[in-house]
Image (spheres, grey):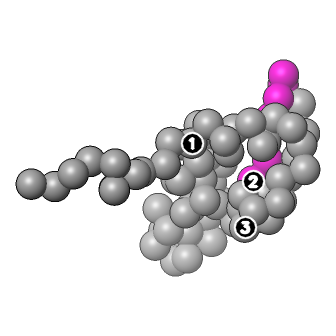
Amino acid sequence: MQDLQREFGITYMLISHDLAVVHHLCEDVAVLWQGRIVEQGPPEKLFTAAEHPYTRTLLEAVPEAEPTAIPLE
C-alpha cells in the first residue's frame, strides 16, 4: 500500500480499530465518536497528547505486552 501511495500519489481512507496499524500507515487520523469527528491530527500528536476523552479511552484500551510477566524456562 505504501509503495503504491508513493509511486502513484494514491490517497487511502483506512477505517480501523487497530491503533498500531493506524499509527504505522496514516499521516492524518480522525477519531469518530457517535458518528462525529471529535479529534483529528497526525498520529504522533493524537497518540501522545490526546485531548478528547474518547480518544484517551481508545488508547488506554490497547493491550500492552508484559514480557517479564511470563517466566521463560
Report the magenta residues as a range.
29-35
The dot on residue 62 is: 1
Residue 1 % position (x, y): 47, 62
Q: Is residue 70 left or right of residue 8?
A: left
User: Does residue 28 appear in this view?
Assistant: no
Q: Find disc 2 in the rendering and name its residue.
A: 29
Query: In the image, is residue 40 part of the stretch drawn in magenta?
Result: no
Residue 72 % position (x, y): 16, 55
The dot on residue 25 is: none
Which marked residue is nearer to the observer: mark 2 or mark 3? Answer: 3
**Secondary structure state at the residue bearing disc 1:** loop
Of the two numbered discs 2 and 3 on the same chain, state the one appearing first in sequence: 2
Q: Please name the residue shown 67% across and 42% down the image.
A: 60
Of the two numbered discs 1 and 2 on the same chain, state the one appearing first in sequence: 2
* Magenta residues, dominant SS class: strand
The dot on residue 44 is: 3
Q: Amino acid at mark 3?
A: Glu
Residue 52 % position (x, y): 89, 43
Residue 55 % position (x, y): 79, 42
